[in-house]
Image (spheres, helix red, strand yellow):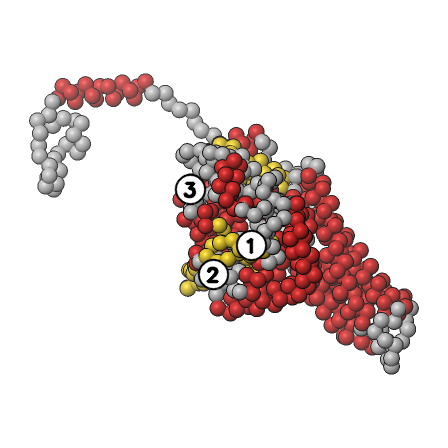
Amino acid sequence: MCPLVIGGAAPSTCPYWRPRPVDHAVCTRTLEAYVALLEQREVPAQRAPQAPWVPQTPQAPRAGQRPAAFRWVFPAISLGVDIVAVNLAFVLSYWLRYVERVGGTGQGFFPLSYRAWLPFEVLVSVLLPLSFALAGVYRQRLSMEWLDEVFVVARAATVGMALTIIVTYLFKEMIDQHSRLVLIFTWVLVIALSSLGRGLVRLIMAHLHRHGWNVRRVVVAGSTPIGRMVMQNLVSRVDQGYRLVGFLHEQGAAPPSFGRFHSLGSVSHIADVVARDRVDEVVIALSSNAHDDITAIRDHCMRQNVAFKIVPDLYEMSLSRVRMDTIAGIPLIDVVESPLRGANLLLKRVLDVTVALLGLLVLAPLLALVALAIRLDSPGPIIIAQTRVGRGGLRFPFFKFRSMYQGAERDHAQMEAAVAGNQPVVMVKHKQDPRRTRVGRVIRKLSIDEVPQLLNVLRGEMSLVGPRPALSSEVLKYESWHHNRFEVQPGMTGLWQVSGRSDLTFDEMMMMDIYYIDNWSLALDLKLLLRTPAAVLLMRGAY
């Protein structure tokens, strides 16, 4: 038996083993080669004892490359504004009650000096900012716009004043002669002054950010539709100090730069891009099947101490339509139907009819003047009815004041070809449309030509807020996901109308419309209605 046959005997227990003739010469040469190899191998030096392995905690993501003090600029200024607003509100409240005698001077009214109110001013100056802090007012959040902040400030001020009133009633023997109206006036004035102060702070911060002060350079990893929406929101929030460097596309074919957003390469180039462009923060907006890329980007950001945010693929469905539940500690996700159903739809309809009727009554004199100007300016009808596509793909007459010469619709195809050229464009907007009349230039800039659509709202064909109704020629060029906007009634104003109007790309408009549908609420409708007059007066993107 050859010595290389381990054990020296055949494994008889194995049913598949069969004895084979052994070539002793081959075995001998193999053994000699193995011994020679052992003789040539160097004995490794004795290793120094190693310290026991201790897991290291990765560094926490930073909030950008900016000095730590810069990160506290907005909260510190906001806190200072609130303290000034609270004390100013208290002074004005005392003046209204005891100098102007607002609220009357009947039985039980005792004139008091301002010194007697000082303890309560100190109490309010402590409790209200504390209530603001607990409500998260001093945290910078991308989702928080000024109008949202006003609502949060109002809620926090209500809680703070409620605590103040509770404290005063606990020690009511000290304030028997104090008028409670001072606290009520203070509550109202704090909401107004703090909101105005925060608006001023946002304007100042936006101005400083535009000039490069305290700016965070951001890269978005992912060119998915949700990634594009993230980019659009980043560039629109100047007051937050984000400067979008560009985006990294998924592995594979490189998409071209679209709109204002520039492609910086593949996600595999994250290390080069972060170093070259001095990136402060990375927003990862990749689909769930790119798990390896997400992990690689996250690990690199943690190693380089670069801040990062991850957009879960769950957001493709929208978190407003996701309900979380558990069973024995196991998380369950349930996708619920769109919020624009049932009672919410009825509530929206009541708001539409009420505001449309009031709008027509209030604006009746203006509408009469506009109608007269159109009649005197050029021949043709005062109001035109275009065919537009509404909810469920149904077509309806879309009312507008005529802003173009009669027969301008016949030249639409020619104008579209001149503006778009050979590019596949879904919706064409001409900044200097030669078909406009003299009156048309004015009423289009101020969106007065849209006011007759209040009649469409009363007829139930449109809503005050919703996706803009599309032309039939535009719908023919839609991709499949664009048709989701037909789930609800079209509207006179909407999310993209107050976010840039015609300056936005078509895909950005579509994504905002679908976001509105998935995240509808009565508060969102009211917020968009309140933002519309400012968007109209600024005339940004209006032509």
Front residue of 39/197: it is 197
Residue 15 position in % (x across, y down): 10, 41
Residue 484 position in % (x across, y down): 45, 53
Q: Amino acid at mark 3?
A: Ala
Q: Amino acid at mark 1?
A: Ile
Decide: few, some or many residues near mark 2? Use Cα within 10 Å; few <14, some 14-19, many ≥20.
some
Q: Quadrant of residue 429?
A: top right
- Determine contact: label 3, label 2, CB under 8 Å: no
Viewer-side label of 1, 3: 1
Give the residue at x 69% y 44%.
206
**Which of disc 3 and disc 1 is earlier in sequence?**
3
Rendered position, 407 above or below 126: above
Q: Answer with left or right where residue 410 lies relative to residue 94.
A: left
Viewer-side label of 2, 1: 1
Q: Quadrant of residue 191?
A: bottom right
Q: Secondary structure at mark 2?
A: loop
Front residue of 192/301: it is 192
Residue beneath disc 3: 290
For the C terminus, the quadrant is top right
Front residue of 439/239: it is 439
Q: Secondary structure at mark 1?
A: strand
Residue beneath disc 2: 338
Q: How many marks?
A: 3
